[in-house]
Amino acid sequence: MATISTILWDVGGVLLTNGWDHHERAAVLSHFGVDREAFEQRHPEANDAWEKGLISVEEYLSRTVFDGPRQFTPGDFVEAMKAQSKRLDDSALGILADLAASDTVTLGMLNNEARELNDFRIQKFHLTDYFDLFLSSCYVGLRKPDARIFRLACDVLQRKPEEMAFVDDRPANVQAAKDIGMHGIVYEGAEKLKLELMDLGLLQWA
């Protein structure tokens, strides 16, 4: 097996809570009294464009929330969205920090996230302290599980797929990485991830 020199990481569900998944949407919509069914009908198409960096948060909200007068502002809504971001209870941040401190492997962020939330999460949780590069969907115009985002990572880093590992909590995204030859790891908690990374020689046995 080729030596793994790079680990790509999802963020929501691995390091932090999800930025704007169904649980976060439900909480914010309930807080503002927005009809969830109507919102969810409009969300998928607008969210795809938003997460690819094709539209701003203002445009996303105009398509999904502000279809009429509201008792709150887009700014109020965005702040409530940001407030949903927290460190995951069983977070891999500690493992990521250890790997970053060891300086033995390249670490990249490869996640589906809209720019306004992505930039906020990077800053709030100091993710620049850990990652060497950021291949977020909003920066590259592609979303997982599209194989092109994984091939782009290989091109940017000038690595072969078999030299890279990818960690994500969603099996479909991991399978997409494996399909192009990467070593895929489904995140099922920090302790299990430690063991899997140890087996790959990326962490030292304690």
Image (cartoon, grey):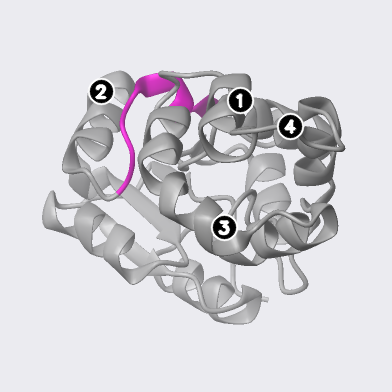
Say what secondary structure mark 3 lies in: loop
Q: In this view, does 87 lie to the left or right of 156?
A: right
Separation of disc 1 and disc 4 at Cα?
18 Å
Give the residue number, with chain letter if any, for mark 3: 21
Of residue 66 and residue 25, the one placed in the foreground of this image is: 66
* Residue 158: mark in rendering: 2
Please state which of residues 163 and 52 is positioned toward the viewer in this rendering: 52
Q: What residue type is labelled 2?
A: Gln
Question: Are the residues tagged 1 and 3 within 8 Å (C-beta)?
Answer: no
Q: Where is residue 181 in the image (x, y as percent from the top left)?
A: 15, 52
Residues at circles 4 and 2 in contact by the CB criterion of under 8 Å: no
Which residue type carries mark 1? Answer: Val
The correct choice, above or below, for 81 with respect to 134 in the image is: below
Please tell me which of labels 4 and 3 falls first in the chain: 3
Which mark is first along the chain, 3 or 1?
3
Residue 56, compared with residue 198, is above or below; it is above
**Structural crowding at the residue carrying mark 3, measured as other residues with C-alpha within 10 Å and reported as few (<14), some (14–19) or many (≥20):** few
Taking the spot 35% from the left edge, 53% from the top edge, the residue there is 165
Q: Position of residue 130 (x, y in %)?
A: 68, 37
Q: Can residue 13 be seen in this view?
A: no
CA gap, disc 4 and disc 3: 25 Å
Residue 68 screen position, x and y as percent: 65, 33
Magenta range is: 133-144
